[in-house]
Image (cartoon, helix red, strand yellow):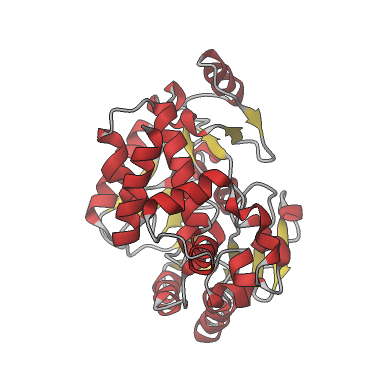
């Protein structure tokens, strides 16, 4: 049954792409248990993670080009001898991504790992100890990670009481690291493109609602979700319906990007062929956001990607346009989890996504 449903998902994915949507379209109505659904999702992730390699194997071994073949290769663990293949097949990525990763062999290996499910504890409703206890009561694993809000668990925990009752939310640990850094800089904080509110929720948790926290999201549907989540999580966040005219001590721009640094969770990102229009969008967002930073305040840029076009080049352009200076972050509590790069840092948490962050200070 599980293999049959996995083949259905892969059939749709090969035709239309968008792995997450294919899973959402098929799994909820498949009449499966939560555990079965997670097992199928694991198979689908393996297929998509190794799709480029599997295509090469299918072509060179003259195998049938079908969803059944992809699923069988995944079940057989065909990637176990990937090291004998050329780089782009070995790490199952596009030539564009291969060129980026050839100088970062550790990243190439890392982006093909299966990530843990990480929770961010909501300190406005619970404690780490209580969340661990609740997960254990449901026979679900839970262990502390490196950040005080982060717990490592299993994917089935997404259906647990702690999620349903908003005692925690699913959030990668590097995303939580970004939130810790934002919170540590203090003052009034504006989450400029907040999406569904993941970082707003974690900042509210880490500060226990002590900071003045504001958020905006241009998409009205996401903004409605953002408001609802802030209410459910007891997060004191003022969600703006339009860009406010006031200025803030810190403006966070968690910008849309290619998502290559999160390829463990969304392996489709490994097949991008260019950065596309993202750098233009990112530079535009930083330009807009810079106007909302108080003199002497901070403009915080974060993207879960590693392309040069979306990282250092964006910051270089933004600094030239706005006259901001880089903040070195030497005194940050979790500085050891940051790897210095031109114009910013890459995150270096052993279980988190690869983020690029840069904090710019506005002149007085």
Seen at 59% across and 53% down, the residue is 78
Q: Tell me if residue 348 comes above or below residue 170 in the rendering.
A: below
Residue projecting furthest to the bottom = 320
Q: Position of residue 263 (x, y in %)?
A: 53, 58
Seen at 44% across and 32% down, the residue is 158
Q: Position of residue 22 (x, y in %)?
A: 31, 50
Residue 329 appears in the picture as rendered: no
Within the image, what quadrant is residue 3 found in?
top left
Q: Nearer the viewer, residue 90 or 361?
A: 90
Q: Nearer the viewer, residue 5 or 104?
A: 5
Seen at 48% across and 41% down, the residue is 42
Image quadrant for the C terminus? bottom right
Residue projecting furthest to the top = 137
Q: Position of residue 303 (x, y in %)?
A: 52, 63
Number of callouts: 0
Q: Is residue 119 left or right of residue 84?
A: left
Q: Position of residue 184 (x, y in %)?
A: 62, 50
Image quadrant for the N terminus? top left
Residue 322 appears in the picture as rendered: yes
Q: Tell me if residue 5 comes above or below residue 183 in the rendering.
A: above
Within the image, what quadrant is residue 81 found in?
bottom right
Q: Is residue 27 left or right of residue 89?
A: left
Within the image, what quadrant is residue 133 found in?
top right
Seen at 51% across and 51% down, the residue is 73
């Amino acid at each position: 049954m599980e293999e049959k449903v996995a083949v259905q998902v892969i059939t749709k994915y090969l035709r239309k792409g968008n792995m997450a949507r294919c899973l959402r379209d098929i799994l909820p109505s498949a009449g499966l248990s939560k555990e079965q659904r997670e097992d199928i999702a694991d198979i689908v992730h393996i297929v998509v993670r190794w799709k480029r390699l599997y295509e090469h194997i299918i072509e060179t071994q003259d195998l049938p080009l079908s969803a059944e073949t992809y699923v069988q290769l995944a079940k057989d663990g065909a990637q176990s001898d990937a090291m004998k293949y050329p780089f782009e097949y070995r790490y199952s990525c596009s030539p564009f991504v291969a060129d980026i990763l050839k100088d970062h062999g550790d990243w190439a290996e890392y982006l093909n790992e299966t990530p843990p499910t990480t929770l961010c504890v909501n300190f406005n409703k619970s404690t780490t100890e209580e969340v661990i206890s609740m997960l254990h009561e449901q026979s679900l694993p839970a262990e502390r990670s490196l950040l005080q809000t982060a717990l490592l668990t299993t994917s089935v925990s997404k259906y647990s009481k702690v999620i349903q009752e908003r005692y925690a939310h699913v959030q990668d640990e590097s995303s939580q690291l970004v939130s810790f850094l934002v919170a540590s800089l203090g003052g009034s904080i504006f989450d400029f493109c907040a999406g569904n509110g993941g970082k707003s929720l974690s900042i509210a948790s880490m500060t226990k609602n002590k900071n003045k926290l504001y958020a905006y999201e241009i998409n009205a549907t996401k903004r409605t979700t953002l408001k609802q989540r802030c209410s459910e999580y007891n997060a004191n966040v003022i969600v703006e319906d339009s860009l406010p005219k006031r200025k803030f001590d810190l403006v966070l721009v968690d910008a849309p990007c290619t998502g290559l640094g999160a390829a463990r969770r969304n392996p489709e990102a490994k097949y991008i062929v260019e950065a596309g229009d993202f750098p233009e969008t990112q530079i535009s967002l930083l330009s807009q956001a810079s106007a909302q930073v108080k003199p002497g305040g901070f403009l915080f840029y974060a993207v879960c990607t590693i392309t040069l076009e979306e990282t250092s080049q964006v910051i270089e352009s933004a600094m030239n346009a706005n006259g901001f200076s880089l903040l070195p972050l030497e005194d940050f509590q979790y500085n050891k989890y940051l790897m210095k790069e031109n114009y910013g840092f890459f995150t270096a948490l052993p279980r988190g996504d690869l983020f690029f962050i840069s904090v710019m200070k506005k002149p007085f």
